[in-house]
Amino acid sequence: MPNADIRPATAADLPAVTEIYAHAVLYGTATFELIPPDLAEMTRRFTSLIDGGYPYLVASLEGRVVGYAYAGPYRPRPAYRFTVENSVYLRPAIHRRGIGLKLLQRLIAECEARGYRQMIAVIGDSANAGSIGVHSKTGFAMIGTHPNVGFKFGRWLDTVMMQRALGEGAATLPGAS
């Protein structure tokens, strides 16, 4: 398989991103959304993240977007301003080929460059071994599981919380903000 090109996402990538996410909503448990957002909503979300200074990346193979990753605010209150939450989604045919790992590694680097200190992963479905494994490979530690907090496809689903320090983490105080 050729190497995936990881680059900042643009508005032109959003139809592919919307398609990838729609599949995850309709057939997967990584997200607890039940109705896929349309292109207008995905564009609004993208713009909000970019305008907020957060990284949003795509992976492409031979010019075709096959996955994406972004970081966004973990929580809206100002004390959380140095903590981000990540998301990574891939086309189903691309799973288990290392592209999610590359996306997450680049996302971590981009967040460190922006001065964030902690990254949180909220992983839908405790049976999502692929996502848990990719996060473990990139230095995330298991924080805990929220059992039975989502209901999708006629069953209760857990969320798994994982976390990793970015840059100096909590070893030093951040600059004035």
Image: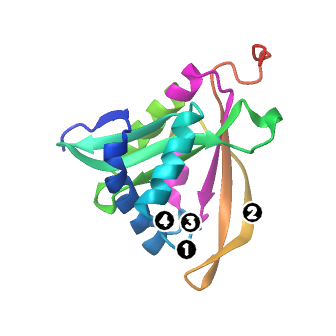
Q: Write down the residue under mark 2.
A: 146
Q: Are marks 1 and 4 in contact (CB under 8 Å)?
A: no
Q: Where 67 falls versus 41 (above or below)?
A: above
Q: Amino acid at mark 1?
A: Leu
Residue 127 bears which disc, if any? 3
Q: CA distance from mark 1 to mark 2?
A: 19 Å
Q: CA distance from mark 3 to mark 1?
A: 19 Å
Label located before the other in sequence (3 or 1): 1
Quarter containing the N terminus: top left
Label 2: element kind: strand
Camera-side mark, 4 or 2: 4
Q: Where 133 falls versus 165 (above or below)?
A: below
Q: Write down the residue under mark 4.
A: 37
Q: Position of residue 62 (x, y in %)?
A: 17, 43
**Closest to the observer: 139 or 102?**
102
Residue 34 bears which disc, if any? 1
Q: Residues within 10 Å of mark 1 (few under 14, many from 20)?
A: some
Q: Is residue 133 visible?
A: no
**Closest to the observer: 90 or 1?**
90
On whether residue 144 falls in the magenta region, the answer is: no
Label 3: element kind: loop
On whether residue 116 falls in the magenta region, the answer is: yes
Label 4: element kind: loop
